[in-house]
Structures are given as structure tokens and as C-alpha cells.
Amino acid sequence: MLKVSYPALKGGASCFFKLDVNKMPPINFDAAIQIQWHVRDMKENPYIDKTTFLENLVKKYFIEWQKFMGERTKNIENLINELNKLIEFYRKQ
């Protein structure tokens, strides 16, 4: 069962699965996939049930993972292209 209880906090937060995933900060994949806010600082949506929370979290994770990997792929492609140019330059000498 996914429920992390925590004391009544900012805005009367009471149940982890009620957190509004759409209002979460970006996922930091370099930091072992952690959420960058403390639970007490996160926004809740009282109309979210457990299944909707999980569905929203999965969507957010996947979208951000694709963006993260896309940026990483571009960086690696640029690095490889620069290295290939250098290799060609040094071969001609």
C-alpha cells in the first residue's frame, strides 16, 4: 500500500499519495532519482486518489526521463563529433 503518513504540515498535508505531481519540481536523475522538495513543502490536491497519483507520477517520470536522456544524448553526440573532427585533423598531419 502506498501511503506515507506525515504530521499535519503546510496546508494540512496528510497523505503522500495526495501530492499533486504536476506541481512537483523536476526530478533530479543525477541524484539517484530523488524529488527535490521536502514533502512538507509540496502541494496537495484533495481530489487525487492513489491510482491517479501513481499514474501522474509515472507520466512525470517518463516525460522527464526522456528529456534528461535527450539532453544527455545531444551532449554525447556533440562530444563524439568534436572528437571525430580532432581525429581527422590529426590524421591529416
Image (cartoon, helix red, strand yellow):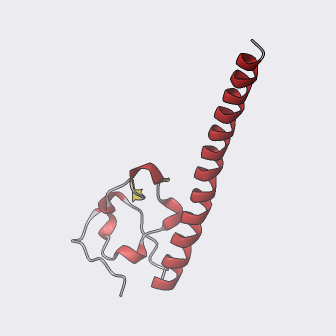
Give the residue displayed 58% in from the left and 57% down from the top.
64
78 with respect to 37 (left or right): right
Q: Quadrant location of the N terminus?
A: bottom left
4 with respect to 72 (left or right): left
Residue projecting furthest to the top: 93
Does 8 sit above or below residue 71? below
Residue 14, by quadrant, is bottom left
Give the residue displayed 39% in from the left and 58% down from the top.
34
Residue 38 in view (yes/no)? yes
Does 78 sit above or below residue 66? above
Residue 63 placement (x, y as % from top left): 62, 61
User: Looking at this view, is 10 or 41 the one in front?
Assistant: 41
Give the residue displayed 64% in from the left and 33% down from the top.
79
Q: Quadrant location of the C terminus?
A: top right
User: Looking at this view, is 57 or 93 the one in front?
Assistant: 93
Residue 84 placement (x, y as % from top left): 71, 29
Q: How many marks?
A: 0
